[in-house]
Amino acid sequence: MLEFAAIIDRKVLAFFMTLTSLKQQPNETASINWLPAAHLTGAPAGAWRSWLQEKGSLTLRLKSHAQQDFKVSVLSEKVILAPANEVALLGCIKQRAWVREVLLEVDGEPWVFARSVLPLNTQGGLRRRLTQVGNTALGQVLFSDPLIKRGPFVFCAPNQLSTPSLWGRASCFYAKNLRLLVAEHFLHPMAKQLALSGAQ
């Protein structure tokens, strides 16, 4: 009985140590330096600029380049205290938010890393729809509702994630009782496949 209790104690201790470790991991997106469009002068022109400033559904545009398939791979969905840079973009007080991180994959290659931040004080049916999309792209909800509007873009330079990345963009989507931040970072496989140069 004592040996069994010791095993249980070790498992409980290991669980709490793991939980503590996860809570102490830094939020890599907290240090991203988001800049308004006026600072986009350093970004590549031509085709790259059109991707960065795409106002329609990025999902649909990515799908148009797929030879075989388009896939949303969910990396994580969690509730956290939103970092200060994201709170500033949302225009709200610091609070807990539902955060979803995904890879948008074209023909098996990751083209975009996307992060969505939804404050928990969001109410109504839209919150349920957005937090229960599973491996469906959020764009299918956001661009199918005419009452949802998109705010201006902000941008970030390459390599501000822990994984190699190219230019990124972020914007807020608004509706009654809704304020959602969506950030999208373009990745190297996309640039290679589309022969986009000068992105770094």
Image (cartoon, grey):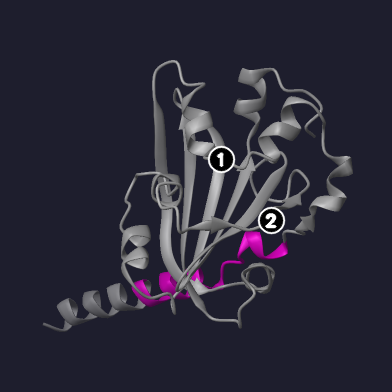
Q: Is residue 66 visible?
A: yes
Q: In the rendered image, which residue does mark 2 sit on?
A: 152
Mark 1: secondary structure: loop
Residue 56 numbered tag: 1
Q: Are marks 1 and 2 in contact (CB under 8 Å)?
A: no
- Was residue 114 drawn as part of the magenta stretch in this picture? no
Q: Quadrant of the N terminus?
A: bottom left
State left or right for residue 93 relative to residue 31.
left
Q: Is residue 136 left or right of residue 158?
A: left
Mark 2 lies on a secondary structure that is loop
- Was residue 25 drawn as part of the magenta stretch in this picture? yes
Q: Main secondary structure of the magenta part?
A: helix
What residue is at 80 percent from the left and 51 percent from the top?
37
The crowding category of the residue bearing disc 1, from other C-alpha atoms within 10 Å (few below 14, some 14 to 19, many at least 20), is: few
Whether residue 109 is visible: no
Which residue is located at x 80 percent, y 34 percent? 200
Q: Position of residue 192 (x, y in %)?
A: 66, 21
Res 158 quadrant in image: top right
> Which of 130 and 191 lies nearest the eye of the viewer?
130
